[in-house]
Amino acid sequence: MKTKKLLALLLAAALTLSLYACSQAEAKTETTPAPAEEAPAEPQTLTIAIASEPATLHPFDHSAVVCGYMNQMTYNKLFTTDLDTLEPIPELVERYTCSDDGLAWDFTLRQGVLFHNGEEMTAADAVASLEYAATFAYCTRYTTFWKTLEQTGDYTFRITTEEPYSLALYDLSSNAACVLPKSLIEAGHDFAADPVGTGPFVFENISIGDRISFTKNNEYYDMTHFPAVDRMVWRVIPEGSSRTIALETGEVDLVVDVESNDVPRLQAEEGIDVLITPGTRLSFMTMNSERAPFSDVNFRKALCAAVDREAVLAVAAGGLGKAALSPNPEVYGGSTLENVTAYDPALAETLLAQSGVDTETLSLTCLCYSDDTRRAAEVIQSYLAEIGVTVEIESLDFAAFLTRMLGGDYDCAVAGYSSTNMLTYMKGLWHSASIGASNSSRYVDPALDELIALAETQTDEAARLETLTEICRRTNDLSLLLPLYTTSVVRACSDRVAGLRVSASGGTLWNDLSLHS
């Protein structure tokens, strides 16, 4: 009996100890806090201020720089432009070859590149996009060089030309070479309202007159230039002083269109960086040659002789740039000052008399769209008044300005144009095929068309430069534009912004921008 009782006590004691141990373990589990999880990083939004609202988000239906910025968010092109050399380099194209006779180009695309709708990009998309671009007037000068365009494999296509074409790769780095999904092109998708490409950002929304937002494309193919911020917002702030204040108060992180009069103030501001790069963009007053009295060359030359470009540069751009005499950028090979009409008030009076224009009954309207273009117009207005030519100034928002300009519904306008090389610049401004796009003077000259066509076939650089110089002499003499100044590219940003690089033509890799604390 004692033995049984002892065993029972031992079992009871063991059970008690076991229950106590369990209760202690449970108590320990309940009172010991779990390891803290790392808080997710705050999404980074980078906000950029621009002066003008994009007229469209469509990649092919414009020739406006600000629209091109938006297209960079959502699209990649077959080639892009190197920021340092301004030469075309492959983007969606992985490799390419050209035949010995210069008539056949073979392209191989990168594989595994996805559109925002999840479809993989193939050569069928590239060919369909080029054919689609060719239906838009703005892209005509980039999409007429080929004889045939055909898909040769899943990721390969070929372009053939009638003659060697020196601008082939430049044209394939233009906006006309953005690649869109073939399926959406065929479905009649509205790319202006909903841009879908392979680009580093995905369109989020637009608030008319206020902002356009994009979010990071997490499936972006290029890890070297993978988006560094989660969201990019473009704020439309028309007034230059308001853009400056927005940067100073931290409302925006970067200003693209910097008010030139505010540059010294921003340079002195702690926490703000100002980047100034000598540029290629030529600012000018374009004259509609389809309308009298601008159809008369002596009248056009009279206006060129009447205006002091140094004064325009000082007032409109705060002296940031170089006064221009030629309507072709002096920074490129092929430029010459032969036949230019420089500032000469006496000559202006003589040329005006030779034109036979009655200034007593003449009243012209000059269009502008921004603070700096209006200041330029005001300086021009005062100088032309001195020779008896009355000019009224009409300020428009950028979309309305473009509509009037491209439709030829204007007398004269302060505008500008930039390109990565002289031949593309000349083709854009002087070729008759560019009327309704960048040929704002709307001048038709078969001799110029022939010279441009010749330069396009000249793969020998020396021969091509000689032809470009002849085009420059001819357009200097025609005085289709009143050259004002070559601008400097100015950007201002918070010192929290990293990765900002700007080319002479104003190009920037927006997806390389990042924010640090």
Image: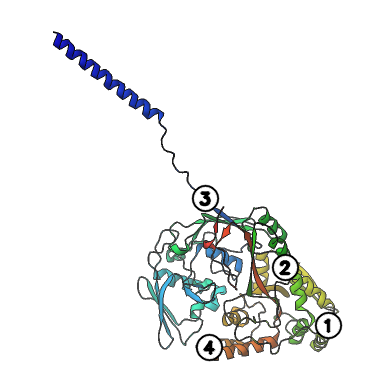
Dot 3: element: loop
Amino acid type at mark 3: Pro
Q: Residue 99, image x and y in percent?
A: 40, 85
Indicate which label's residue lies in the foreground, 4 or 2: 4
Residue at coordinates 81% horizontally, 77% vertically from top-left?
Answer: 383
Query: Does the image show residue 465?
Result: yes
State the count of labels.
4
Q: Quadrant of residue 235?
A: bottom right
Q: Residue 290, image x and y in percent?
A: 70, 80
Amino acid type at mark 4: Glu
Near mark 1 (Cα within 10 A), the count class, few <14, some 14-19 or many ≥20, is: few
Q: CA distance from mark 2 to mark 3?
A: 36 Å
Q: Nearer the viewer, residue 509 or 14?
A: 14
Amino acid type at mark 2: Asp
Considering only order in the chain, which callout, 2 or 4, is on the residue closer to the N terminus?
2
Q: CA distance from mark 2 to mark 1?
A: 30 Å
Dot 4: element: helix
- Residue 449, relative to residue 11: is it above or below? below
Q: Quadrant of residue 97?
A: bottom left
Residue at coordinates 62% horizontally, 82% vertically from top-left?
Answer: 430
Q: CA distance from mark 4 to mark 2?
A: 37 Å
Indicate which label's residue lies in the foreground, 2 or 1: 2
Residue at coordinates 18% horizontally, 12% vertically from top-left?
Answer: 6
Identify residue for label 2: 372
Near mark 4 (Cα within 10 A), the count class, few <14, some 14-19 or many ≥20, is: few
Q: CA distance from mark 1 to mark 4?
A: 47 Å
